[in-house]
Structures are given as structure tokens and as C-alpha cells.
Image (cartoon, grey):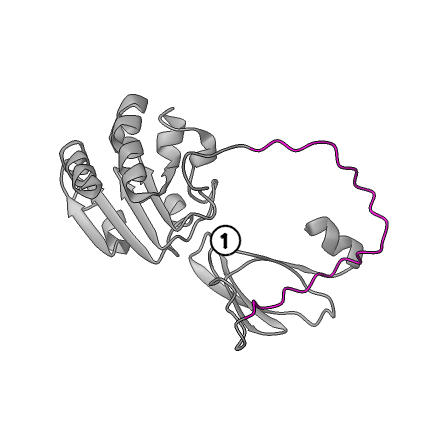
Amino acid sequence: MPRVAALLDVAQISDITAIENENTFVRPIYAGNAIATIESSDEIKVITTRATAFPPAEYEADGSKVLIENGVDPNSESPIKWVSENLTKLDRPSLATASKVVSGGRGLKSKEEFDRVILPLADAFGAAVGASRAAVDSGYADNSLQVGQTGQVVAPQLYFCVGISGAIQHLAGMKDSKVIAAINKDADAPIFQVADVGLVGDLFDTVPELTEKLKK
């Protein structure tokens, strides 16, 4: 998108979370610690939106779907050549667009425990799997699962974090979640300052118990 904006000689507005009017947009800055209101007088707007920040398109009064305008001329000759298509089947929802995310942190202590504790809980919720940077750096989870300032930014309906202390870098990637739930044995962990629901306890006892109840 930056290249598109440059070719059109307009400014790009990235990661917007709200549209006030046709020229005014809202986006987080400083790792989500401040909100900026940006006005653009460009006739053509090049914007990107934060995933899940906006509700799905609503239906018209007659029951038809809202028309999505396509700015591409269907009669223009495309330089793109179709080569092939490879479909990858995911066992769980995509982290970027999932409505529910279960994330694990360094409190899981090992990759084996991460898989044993987090994956069944995510499956019970029908959720995507995420991880803190500490968990990724420790080798517990793949880099593609990292949530945070240097990972993916998510805003699901439910963000369930297990064994995550709540470093500011991680909070920057999930603080816009509608409901934040946390399990941590440290009652003073920063994650409880932003959590809507919190449980102080040993995750190795509480999470498997919760998983079994969800399965029922």
C-alpha cells in the first residue's frame, strides 16, 4: 500500500480503527498508548484498517447485501498472470481474523507444556493460538503466532492469555480486544490491570480443568 500511495502522490493512512467522516480517521500511535485523529484533504484516500476493528457489512433495507465498490476497471488489461493455486487447510482459525484467541506466555515453561496446555484450550474454544514474544523467543511457539508490538496486532471478541505477565510490548498487540481474560499465578502481574476477567492460580491446574469443562 505505501507504493500505491506513492504512485498516486497521496499520503497513506495506516491501521485505522475508526472513520469519523470522509476526511477524518482515527488510528493508534506509540504502540497503542495514544490515539491520533488524522485529517486528509487528498481526493483519493489510501488507507489500511486494523483487522476486526470494524463490524461486518450490514444488509440493506431490502435484504440485499451492502454494495462493495470495486475501483478496478474490469476492462483494463492486467499484467498479472495466473500460475497456480495451492490451498492450505488450517486446523484452527487464522490469528489475524479470529474472533477468539488463546495465547500462552513464558509461564508455560516449555514447548511441550505449551502444546499440552494451550492447544486443547484453544480447540475447546474454537479459537486461534497466539503467543507472547517471550514464549516465541524461548522456542515454545512459532514466530507466526507472536502477538505484540513486534508481532501481530489482534482485536478479537475474546483474548484469553495464559502465563503472560503483560509486558507493554504484548499489550500493544491485543489491548483493543473486546474481552480480555487472564490466568497467572502472580497477583501483581500487569496483565490483570487490563483484564476484564482474571484468575490468580497455577495454570497447570486451572487450565486443564477449564478445558475439560468447556468440552462438556
Question: Residue 17: x, y in percent?
Answer: 50, 62
Task: Tell me the kind of residue under disc 1.
Answer: Ala
In the image, is residue 69 part of the stretch drawn in magenta? Answer: yes
Is residue 190 among the parts visible in the rendering?
no
**Circle 1 — which element?**
loop
Q: Residue furthest bottom?
A: 61
In this image, 168 relative to 83: left or right? left
Identity of the residue drawn at 40% across and 44% down: 169
Q: Where on the picture, by quarter, is residue 166?
A: top left
Q: Is residue 132 above or below residue 155?
A: above
Identity of the residue drawn at 68% across and 51% down: 1
Residue nearest the observer in this picture, 196 or 28: 196
Residue nearest the observer in this picture, 116 or 203: 116
Q: Is residue 34 above or below residue 135?
A: below
Residue nearest the observer in this picture, 186 or 53: 53
Question: Residue 157: x, y in percent?
Answer: 36, 55
Identity of the residue drawn at 43% across and 35% down: 145
- Main SS of the magenta part reads loop
Identity of the residue drawn at 63% across and 64% down: 68
Residue nearest the observer in this picture, 215 or 62: 62
Q: Which residues are magenta?
A: 64-87
In the image, is residue 102 part of the stretch drawn in magenta? Answer: no
In the picture, which quadrant includes the C terminus?
Answer: top left
Q: Is residue 32 above or below residue 168?
A: below
Q: What residue would you read off at disc 1? A: 51
